[in-house]
Image: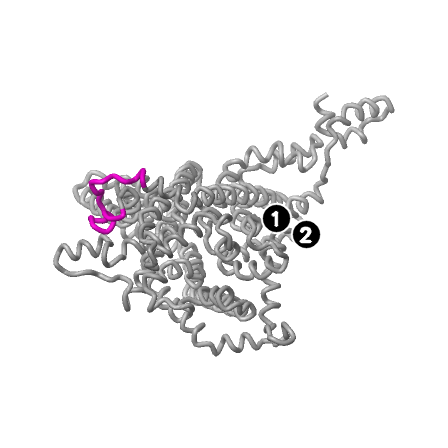
Amino acid sequence: MTIAARTVRSPAFRRQRWLLTAVLGAYFVYTFIPLLYVIVAATKTNADLFGTFGLWFAEDFAFWENLRGLFTYQDGAFSGWLLNTFLYAAVSGLGAAFFATCAGYALAKFRFRGRALCFALVLGAVMIPQTALSVPLFLMLSKIGLVNTPAAVILPSLVFPPGVFLMCVYIEDAVSNELIEAGRVDGAGELHIFGKIAFRLLMPGFATVLILAFVSTWNNYFLPLVMLSSSEYFPITVGLSQWYASATSGSGGAVLFTIVMAGALVSVLPVIAAFLFMQRWWQGGLASGGVKA
Amino acid sequence: MPTIRASPSSELGAGGGAATAATARLAVRPHRRIVVGRRLAPYVFLAPFLLLFAGFLVAPLLYAFQMSLFRETLVGGARFVGIDNYVRAIHDRNFWDGIGRLFQFGFMQIPVMLGLALVFALILDSGMALARGFFRVAFFIPYAVPGVIAALLWGYLYGPAFGPFSQLSVAMGLGQIDFLAGGGLLPSLANIAVWEYTGYNMIIYYAALQSIPRDLEEASAIDGATALQHAIRIKLPLILPTITVTIIFSIIGTLQLFTEPYLMRNLAPSQINSHYTPNYYAYTEAFTSQQYNYSAAISFALGAVVAVASYGFMLLANRRGRR
């Protein structure tokens, strides 16, 4: 009998339950304010954005105009950015998840010379933030002429050390040694065992790492900011922040305020959807192994 | 013959007669595939990741380190100067200004963020609040919002003329609030980070709390402990290692601060200068002043500060833990 179960019927417990729920509710209001604001602001005309209360809708519903503005401003630059973001995130997400799965499988299921070193490298790399690497990466890639190409964003994003760590922890439990041994006794090659037997079992882990890597590229700002100089290659984060900068610099960009809000809304929705989708696998306790995403 | 197709190597040894070997080869040929042995396999699986790791993580670091030892001169190109750039960084007020600001930022932001995350995780784990699943997901959502968008949204919310908080204050006759003026700027930036990462840390704590055996709670209940006593005396000490890890990651993250001040530079132009944080400084040195060598040196000097700060904290935590 747990503490909560023991006291569940007492009036003191009810009071505590409402108090604790109220604490969570208060923080929920704080969490929700910016999200409400972006939804409300995306539906307003520019005049209403400045003239009406920020956290509630105005009488004019200008969402569709803002959306049209978003996709037509600067010859529809935003749709290009959206496509770029999707492309960068999908390619590097799939690649990163695949390479992390292979590496994690090797670290989890084989004992070999250099394993401890590999493990230390991966763990050390988890500690290095992307931001710290971006300027050195730029310096090196500009030497070999790769800057200002999509590859400059995609290739570095294929290295996702937290994914290797997560997959290693996951595969340890998800793929039983007996199964691999059985495959070997049947004479199957190691690649065959991995591709045909193990991969099916580690799909939930693969999907989680895929989503984490996808989102981390989707949300990445510093790397593309450093690498890309032509607007045609920008992802949403860099493009929108540029519009925002011209809106706030006061040089006649004020019309952009509502457009930027519509863009923010459009760029946030896929990521939130991806995370909500991922929730399903979290119940299984995969998150307990993941210290840093 | 499904077994033969699955095992092209084994029947070569097993097949005694020439006839069986011939039929085996016939059966195998259309499905010939590369068979990787057990000893080679881990290296094959690791190779793609390690190649990319070497190319896009190790190599840039080495290259940038090499660059940090040179200086561009107008005559004669790059010249080897040894640790000169580092000596310059150590004496650079701009660099230390940024570091000092980040320590202020961290001392404000990290305790608030992790404290809230811990409280919420304990509440969720105690099972005593209502709608726990809803709150768990809702608190995590800000982490899914790109840092740029979060900074941008708060930039709107902080606006003295049209931000909702300032609007409310004006409506109550208290006048406009300028969140980004003077001493308000740093706490306002810290608030963005709190908003973004509290839920994320909460999930980590929650996962750690969930792995604590439930029978400990029964033992506490038999001893007559309240849920609060159980949380503080039993649960907290058990997840202390997790807390240490989140503090270290928060220190690392804090010292990398760039996006929020960079996006707010137009909103508080008198305060956010080109060396507001070390990363900002490295960025402007590289991309505005074209001082690539010095920029690389700053990046590494910052890396050294990060290493010292997180290692120092680890030592501190270990010593406390032993006592």
* Image position of B60 (left or right of A17): right
Evaluate if marks 2 and 1 touch, with contact meaning CB atoms under 8 Å apart. no
Residue A279: x and y in percent read: 41, 39
Q: Residues within 10 Å of mark 1 (few under 14, many from 20)?
A: many
Q: Residue A113 carries which label?
A: 2
Secondary element type, mark 1: helix
Q: Can residue B164 be seen in this view?
A: yes
Badge 1 amino acid: Phe
- Looking at the image, residue A147 lies above or below residue A40: below
Q: Mark 1 points at which residue?
A: B49
Q: Which chain carries label 2?
A: A
Whether residue A95 appears in magenta in the rendering, the answer is no
Q: Mark 1 lies on which chain?
A: B
Q: Can residue B236 be seen in this view?
A: no
Q: What residue is at 51 percent from the left and 48 percent from the top?
A: A233
Q: In which quarter of the image is the C terminus of chain B?
A: bottom left
* Image position of A215 (left or right of A58): right
- What residue occupies the far left of the structure in this picture? B173
Q: What residue is at 44 percent from the left and 37 percent from the top?
A: A281
Residue B312: x and y in percent read: 46, 68
Q: Which of A6 and A211 is in front in this view?
A: A211
Badge 2 amino acid: Arg
Q: What residue is at 69 percent from the left and 32 percent from the top?
A: A188
Q: Which of A195 and B87 is in front in this view?
A: B87
The boundaries of the magenta stretch are A46-65
Q: How crowded is mark 2: few (under 14 residues within 10 Å), some or many (20 or more)?
A: few
- Are marks 2 and 1 in one subunit? no
Residue B233: x and y in percent read: 32, 55
Q: In which quarter of the image is the N terminus of chain B?
A: top right
